[in-house]
Amino acid sequence: MPYLQTSKKSRALLDIKSQKCGLRHTIFSVIGNEYTGEWQDNKKHGKGTQVWKKSGAIYHGEWKFGKPDGYGTYSVLFPETKELAKKYCGEWKHGKKHVCILYSVHAQSIRCIHALRYVMCSFLSLQGYGMYLYNNLAVYEGEWSENQRSGWGRMYYESRDIYEGEWMKDKNNGQGIIRCANGNWYEGTWGEGKKNGDGKFYYSDKGQLYEGIWLDGVAKCGTLSDFGRNEAPTPSKCQIPQVRLVDMQLVLRESEEAYLETINSKFPLHNTLTENE
């Protein structure tokens, strides 16, 4: 059989024609992901739809040089019901969310929601300011860093409690206020997701106020006094009696020092508590 040698010009023309450029039919990757849409210089560029085989997630929108860039919608697949839920719809830049508008179709089990959050974050890089819907009742709106709540943010919990304040590495950390569904609220210092440091807890249902030191979410040293007792729906039967000491503040400071030392060792940022006294 004769051997036909192609010229360099023919090979160059063949290479050009084999490159993906312009509108193409569905292209499958080696791992099974599929893309249907426009290309430029062998990269996804223009409008197109990407389907991830492993997670079932879908991105439909604009691309630039192989990454989502422009306007697009990202949907995830509920593993139990096999239904798609639109999780993000808005602007993208260099493959990351740029302006955040989030949607949730309906509530699923907590286990399912957590699984979806992991799948979603494996593709999205949560960075900057945005909103995330854990389910129909739990929503976070605020700042993100490396897929974690970090900075200022507001969290609406499924219990209908609302926290507003500072976050670090996905936990309440710094100054913040939590308003409980029953009307009570706490304002003060947080660390590792718990009340840690100086804070006030208002028992609006009983008409009482606690002011003092907290450690790992437990009140350790402080004062309890009547506060709005006449307006409280279920006030205590007796008023809190006045404590008469020669120097009440001295007694409190001595008690607080022991707990502040523990708190400051766990949370160095809380050192300002002792310096302000």
Image: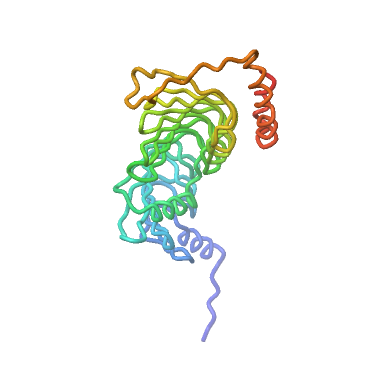
Q: Quadrant of the C terminus?
A: top right
Instruction: Say if residue 32 shows up in the picture.
Output: yes
Q: Nearer the viewer, residue 10 or 99?
A: 99
Q: Is residue 238 above or below residue 145?
A: above
Q: Residue at x 39, y 45 (%)?
A: 134
Residue 54 x %, y %: 44, 62
Q: Nearer the viewer, residue 167 or 263?
A: 263
Residue 195 x %, y %: 54, 34
Callout count: 0
Farthest residue in the top direction?
Answer: 246
Quarter of image, res 20: bottom left
In the image, 145: left or right of 111?
right
Q: Residue at x 34, y 41 (%)?
A: 137
Q: Nearer the viewer, residue 272 or 80?
A: 272
In the image, 37: left or right of 3?
left
Residue 7 x %, y %: 55, 67
Q: Residue at x 55, y 42 (%)?
A: 146
Farthest residue in the bottom direction?
Answer: 1
In the image, 101: left or right of 274?
left
In the image, 188: left or right of 114?
right
Q: Is residue 158 above or below residue 255?
A: below
Q: Is residue 155 above or below residue 43?
A: above
